[in-house]
Amino acid sequence: MFHHSKRLINITIVVLVFALLSGFIVAPAASAKPNAPKNIIVMISDGWGFNHIQSTSYYVYGKAGRQAYNHFPIKLAMSTYENYYDTSPCYGLGYDPNSAWSDFDYVKSCVTDSASAATAMSTGVKTYNGAIGVDMNQQPLLHAMQVAEVKGKSTGVVTSVQFSHATPAGFIAHNISRNNYAEIANEMIYASATDVIMGAGHPWFDDSGNPIVVPNTFKYVGGETTWADLVNGSAGNDANGDGDFDAWTLVQTRQEFQNLATGSTPERVVGVAQVYSTLQQSSLGDGYTDPFVIPLTESVPTLEEMTRAALNILDNDPQGLFLMVEGGAVDWASHANQSGRMIEEQIDFDKAVQAVIKWVRKNSNWGETLLIVTGDHETGYLNGPGSDPTWEPIVNNGKAILPGMAWYSGNHTNSLIPFFSIGFNAQSFKQYANLIDPVRGAYMDNTNIAQVIFQLLESQ
């Protein structure tokens, strides 16, 4: 029997009842097609903004707007603000386009974090900063992946940072705090119906991919006992409700990740690259400006390689797949104002997008696959040199030369970020883009991602 021929009955009942009571699954719009997408792929460049994309395009191509997603039929802006308790000075505030372009400092306050942003994109509900899959009252929310699993689809998350970090966790887990890494990892491994989990966080390697004698904390992989279970093959659960134990297969080396990109695969894979914090960004600090001055760590997979592996595992399911891929270290580099590292990480993410497009063209088609490419928030307030109090453009210095760019924050901002989509019913997002920003044009909200996905899944 195929792994996803059926799902846990109790999960099905809980999910459907919860959805009906909460109203998260809305009736399809009159214009919606009568069937759902077979495959849903959400790709998140954590921390990106319009200028992150432009800077990278200048460096790689010498011209703006050359990345693949710039040619998608749906190109919008997206708001990312969180919800706030009534005791917060930000209570009731969202994003004001007029203030955003009349006051240079406006977007520096009342910002979201990755946890609440991921939760909003996964559940369609705004929540507080730090929340993983729970609402303002710390009650669990319904993830779109849970509905996809009830529909028989394989699911997975891939990231360039620790796999229990905010964004991948925000698509699977439920926890009152993103900082409860061990609890989150254990829910992902022992209590979810997920089929692929890939990222960093290896306790026995440092940030440069070197083996170490005394391990780092095991919290990102669920604790020392959980790690031992993964290593000996005893971690898992009855994910499909057939009464059999569905164990995880652990992969660690770059070659193992590369091997998974073709041929037959295990049914469930946890991939923990042999590096601690991030695949690349954390390896050698921030003592340089240009991209690729320091050689990349060759012993760890790229985000593209992880993505290709995940797709090859998940596409064994005849009912389709739901995959989230995060370029998590774009955010880390932007927090540190590392211009070169940011471009490196954005290039890695862009290559992963290209890999997905190639997979769709070879193994699927745009009539049955929906691809979303966006971020969770902007980080670093990246603009051109000489900005503040006005906004100056990024300077194109030519291909393979660092553009003229400057950072005006070390934190997240409340700026609108780019949203791109292509494929099955991608036009559905346009109905939500009913607000206008004077610079970015029509924009939607991050909660609209889950709302559209719920709508499409429920038409299956």
Image (tube, rainbow, N blue to C red):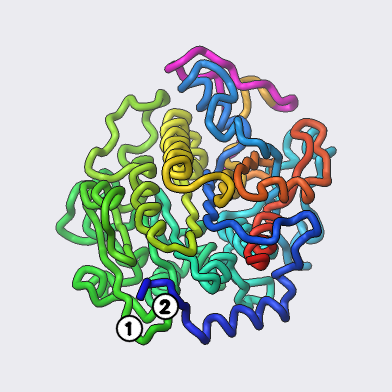
**Quick check: 391 left or right of 306?**
right
Q: Quadrant of the C terminus?
A: bottom right
Number of other residues with Cα within 10 Å of mark 2, as a class: few under 14, some 14 to 19, many 20 or more: many
Query: Farthest residue toward the left?
Result: 213
Check if mark 1's residue and mark 2's residue have beta carbons within 8 Å.
yes
Q: Secondary structure at mark 1?
A: loop
Estimate the spatial distance between the alpha carbons at disc 1 and disc 2, rounded to whole Å.
8 Å
In magenta stretch: residue 400: yes
> Which region shows up in magenta?
388-411
* Image height of 121 relative to 193, above or below: above
Please name the amino acid that badge 1 sits on: Asp
Q: Position of residue 290 (x, y in %)?
A: 40, 23
Query: Farthest residue toward the top?
Result: 398
Residue occupying the point 25% across, 74% down:
229
Q: Is residue 288 visible?
A: yes
Q: Position of residue 309 (x, y in %)?
A: 34, 51
Nearest to the observer: residue 186 or residue 23? 23
Tag 1 residue: 244
